[in-house]
Image (spheres, rainbow, N blue to C red):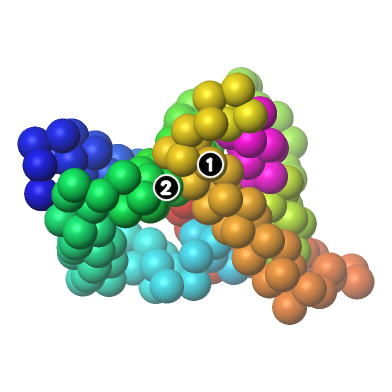
Amino acid sequence: MSESHWPGLLCWVALYCSDYVLTIRCARLYQAGVREKIVFEGSYEITPYFQKDVDSLKSVSPRFILALVWTTGALALFAYLSRGSQPADEVYRFLLGGLILLELAVHVRHVRNLYLFRMALLPHAIRGRIEYSRSVALRVSSIELVSFAAMFLVVFVFTHSSFVLGGSVTCLYTAWTHWRLAPKHPLPSGGAGPEADTADPGTG
C-alpha cells in the first residue's frame, strides 16, 4: 500500500467515528426533551444493524467497532491490490468515494439534526408537536439520499471521477434500501400516533 492511500483510509476512519459520535449526541438530546416536540416511530436509527446500540445510547458499540474494522480492512486490502495497476486503483477510488461521500451526506443530516434538536429544547424556538411514522421517515431519508446521488452524478459527468461515481452509487443504493423498507411499516390508520418513549435518533 503506497503513501497516497493513507489519507483516504484515515479520512474514512475519522468520518465513520464522527458519524457514530454525532448519532449518540443527537440521541441524548432527543431523550433530554426533544421527543416532547418531535416524535419518530420506533428507533430513529434507520439502519437495523445499529438500532439496539443507538437506542441504549452506547458510547462504545461492539457492532460499530466490528463494522469499522471490517470496512477499513477491506479498503486497505483493495489499496494493497491496486499497487501498480490503473484499473485496480480506479476500483479502489470508486469504493473509497462510495464510503466517504455517503458519510458526508449523512453528516449533513447530523448537523441539521443537532441544530434542530438544540432549538427544540428552547422554550419558544419550536412550538407544537409533530410525529413521523416509520414509513414516512424512511421515504424522507430515501428522497434525501437520491438528491445527493443526483448531485454527485452531475459532478461525475464533468469530472469523470471514479471517486465521485462511487458516492453517487452508494447514495442511490442506500436510498433504494430505505425505500424498500418503507412498505414493511404501514402508515397508521389513526390513534395517538407513534410512541415517543421508543424513539431514539441516529443516522441514515
- Whether residue 158 is in magenta: the answer is no
Q: Which mark is residue 20?
A: none
Residue 19 in view (yes/no): no
Q: Viewer-proximal residue, 119 or 60?
A: 60
Q: Viewer-proximal residue, 69 or 159?
A: 159
Which residues, given as a range, are shown in magenta? Answer: 144-154
Q: Position of residue 143 (x, y in %)?
A: 73, 46
Q: Is residue 167 above or below residue 161?
A: below
Residue 139 figure quarter: bottom right
Which residue is disc 1 drawn over? 165
Q: Position of residue 23 (x, y in %)?
A: 38, 48
Label total for image = 2
Q: Residue at x 40, y 67 (%)?
A: 50
Left or right relative to 186: residue 116: left
Tell me the crowding category of disc 2: few under 14, some 14 to 19, or many 20 or more residues within 10 angstroms, Cα based.
many
Q: Position of residue 179 (x, y in %)?
A: 72, 62
Q: Position of residue 197 (x, y in %)?
A: 54, 64
Which SS does the magenta portion mostly show?
helix
Which residue is disc 2 drawn over? 94
Amino acid beneath label 2: Phe
Q: Residue at x 68, y 61 (%)?
A: 176
Label 2–label 1 contact, CB within 8 A: yes
Tell me the crowding category of disc 1: few under 14, some 14 to 19, or many 20 or more residues within 10 angstroms, Cα based.
many
Residue 148 in view (yes/no): yes
Dot 1 lies on which element? helix
